[in-house]
Amino acid sequence: MEREFVLETERLRLRRYRRDDVDELDAILGDPETMRYYPEPYSRARVLEWIEDNIRRYREDGSGLWAMELKETGAFAGNCGPAVRVVQGTPQIELGWHVARPLWGQGLAPEAAAACRDWAFEHLDAERVIALVRPENLPSRRVAEKIGMTVEDEVLYGQMSWVHLVYAVHR
Ligand SMILES: CC(C)(COP(=O)(O)OP(=O)(O)OC[C@H]1O[C@@H](n2cnc3c(N)ncnc32)[C@H](O)[C@@H]1OP(=O)(O)O)[C@@H](O)C(=O)NCCC(=O)NCCS
């Protein structure tokens, strides 16, 4: 069951995380350049917690961040997926995305995110899908824009309560 792919795009397969993904995910979430818009890069222990949290989300919410693999080589490429997050007291479906640094600039995040947006509207009871992005994170803002999202709000979010733009696209 765990090895089944949830989604396929032209270049990517998205599947549920497994605990043995920790090393490959650590290379992404533990990388200071990739995590420059986060309070700090994740420790290996935090990466493992992150995987556990997504496995819980699959069970409780039916979705979460999924691992992405390049179809051509099977290489681990990053993650993308819809996760339930409480924003200003209301549960929302948020799309998140991280891509392995050597693969940046090839349009992989928008390709995955567009498929996740469509999956969310098909499978989840959501009128809109959002992405929470720090204003300074221009590459991530471009991904949101490329999948048809626009800024609808600004909120204080995360462990540091930093300002995040609420990008959204409606059903
Ligand atoms: C945001 C991110 C997922 C984009 O993934 P991607 O597959 O490279 O997406 P794209 O190829 O569509 O590029 C998006 C934008 O990234 C920027 N970009 C492209 N190549 C880049 C590179 N080598 N280095 C830095 N930025 C680059 C460009 O602004 C690009 O927009 P453009 O196509 O209009 O020029 C990726 O940069 C990443 O993993 N960033 C770190 C994690 C992160 O911040 N996640 C989002 C949290 S809200």
Image (cartoon, helix red, strand yellow):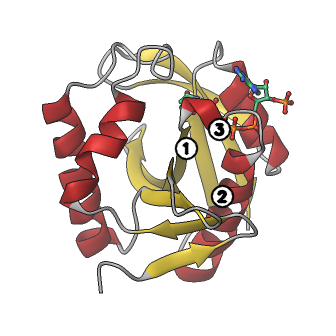
* Quarter occupied by residue 104: top right
Using residue 150 as the reference point, say whether residue 140 is left or right of it. left
Residue type indicated by callout 1: Trp
Residue tagged 1: 97
Residue tagged 3: 103
Look at the image and tell me in which quarter the N terminus lies.
Answer: bottom left
Residue, far left: 45
Look at the image and tell me in which quarter the C terminus lies.
Answer: bottom right
Residue sitting nearer the eye, 133 or 55? 55
Mark 1, other Cα within 10 Å: few <14 / some 14–19 / many ≥20: many
Using residue 168 as the reference point, say whether residue 92 is left or right of it. left
Are the residues tagged 1 and 3 within 8 Å (C-beta)? Answer: no
Q: Is mark 3 within 8 Å of ligand 1?
A: yes
Q: Is residue 143 above or below residue 33?
A: below
Mark 1 and mark 3 lie on one chain; the one further toward the N terminus is 1
Q: Is residue 44 above or below residue 36?
A: below
* Quarter occupied by residue 16: bottom left
Residue at position x 33%, y 25% in the image:
30
Residue, far front: 73
- Report, in whole angstroms, how far the alpha carbon at label 3 lies from the one at label 2: 13 Å
Image coordinates for residue 133, horizontal then vertical, percent: 59, 29
Are the residues tagged 1 and 2 within 8 Å (C-beta)? Answer: yes
Residue at position x 33%, y 19% in the image:
41
Residue tagged 2: 112
Residue type indicated by callout 3: Leu
Q: Name the quadrant where ligand 1 sits.
A: top right
Callout 1: SS:
strand
Q: Is mark 1 within 8 Å of ligand 1?
A: yes
Image coordinates for residue 169, horizontal then vertical, percent: 74, 53
